[in-house]
Image (cartoon, rainbow, N blue to C red):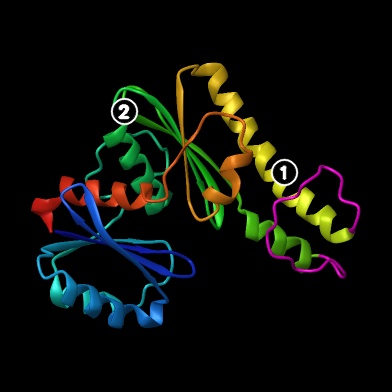
């Protein structure tokens, strides 16, 4: 069994895989990681190794706790990846993006794939049908847009995300919802359209924390998979299983 640890900006997600099948998932704060890890360990005693994808600040104590129990691969640009990386600054490529492209490489061989991760940021990553990663784009996520309107103005309120029912915001709050959410939807549709012009047979994957919030309003044919990053990390760990 493999233990997958995805350290984000605000929380930590853990998953246990038996071969390619996910057996369980957990999410916790970084301060609760050790207790969560002990719970996972007691429930699944067949775990043999672990992988960590860290885009936040995991902390030495959490690293030590994990390494105490399992040989651990800490994903980096130097790790063996299952695709050809054509990013010109590979040392700056986020490990979360590496994992997403790895999942696409495994699941959609010889296809042109656009992976959209709607989380804290919205990332767009493209893998072509020759298994070459060509790069993509990064833009502010839904919550970040709400926060920026509040932070950089004197009077606009901080709102929780809400899907607008109209394109016309007839109050300040409704106008913010329209401005934030519809702009995100239009952005996503625009990226898909631009890629489809060059790659007509394009498969689009939508994942991340806001995937289910957005997917029903996206007109293009997409495949939503909330476990896509975890699946990619598991695939990377299998690729590197003899080096950890």
Q: Which residues are magenta?
A: 153-171
In what element is the residue under mark 1?
A: helix
Return the residue found at the far right.
170
Mark 2: few, some, or many residues within 10 Å (few <14, many ≥20)?
many
Q: Which marked residue is nearer to the observer: mark 1 or mark 2?
A: 1
Quadrant in the picture for residue 113 = top left
Point out the image quarter for the N terminus. Answer: bottom left
- Tag 1 residue: 183
Q: Main secondary structure of the magenta part?
A: loop
Task: Judge from the rendering whether residue 168 lies leftward or rightward of residue 114; answer left or right.
Answer: right
- The residue positioned 65% from the left and 60% from the top of the image is 144
Residue 197, numbered label: none
| Residue that mark 2 sits on | 131
Residue 77 in view, yes or no:
no
- Secondary structure beneath disc 2? loop
Magenta span contains residue 40: no
The residue lying toward the viewer, choosing from 81 and 207, is 207
Q: Residue 200: image x %, image y %?
A: 50, 16
For the residue pair 81 and 235, the one nearer the viewer reads as: 235
Please report the residue visible at 29 percent of the width from the left and 34 percent of the height from the top: 107
Relative vertical location of residue 95 with respect to residue 102 in this rendering, above or below: below
**25 versus 133 height, above or below:** below
In the figure, 113 relative to 70: above or below? Answer: above
**First in sequence: mark 1 vs mark 2:** 2
**x then y, percent, for residue 40:** 23, 73
Label 1, label 2: how far apart the Cα atoms are = 31 Å
Can residue 233 be spotted in the picture?
Answer: yes
Pinpoint residue 135: horizontal percent, then vertical percent.
46, 36
């Amino acid at each position: 069994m493999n233990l997958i640890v995805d350290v984000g900006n605000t929380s930590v997600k853990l998953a246990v895989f038996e071969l390619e099948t996910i057996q369980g998932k957990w999410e916790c704060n970084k301060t609760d990681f050790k207790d969560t890890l002990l719970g996972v360990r007691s429930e699944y005693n067949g775990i043999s190794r672990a992988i960590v994808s860290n885009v936040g600040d995991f902390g030495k104590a959490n690293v030590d706790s994990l390494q105490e129990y399992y040989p651990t691969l800490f994903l980096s640009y130097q790790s063996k990846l299952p695709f050809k990386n054509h990013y010109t600054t590979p040392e700056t490529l986020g490990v979360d993006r590496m994992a997403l492209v790895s999942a696409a490489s495994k699941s959609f061989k010889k296809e042109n794939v656009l992976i959209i991760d709607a989380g804290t940021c919205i990332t767009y990553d493209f893998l072509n049908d020759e298994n070459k990663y060509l790069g993509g784009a990064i833009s502010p996520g839904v919550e970040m847009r709400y926060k920026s309107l509040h932070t950089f103005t004197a009077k606009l309120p901080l709102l929780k995300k809400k899907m607008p029912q109209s394109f016309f915001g007839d109050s300040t709050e409704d106008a913010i919802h329209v401005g934030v959410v519809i702009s995100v939807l239009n952005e996503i549709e625009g990226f898909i359209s631009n890629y489809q012009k060059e790659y007509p047979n394009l498969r689009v994957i939508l994942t991340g924390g806001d995937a289910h919030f957005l997917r029903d309003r996206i007109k293009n044919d997409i495949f939503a998979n909330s476990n896509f990053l975890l699946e990619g990390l598991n695939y990377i760990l299998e690729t590197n299983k003899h080096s950890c």
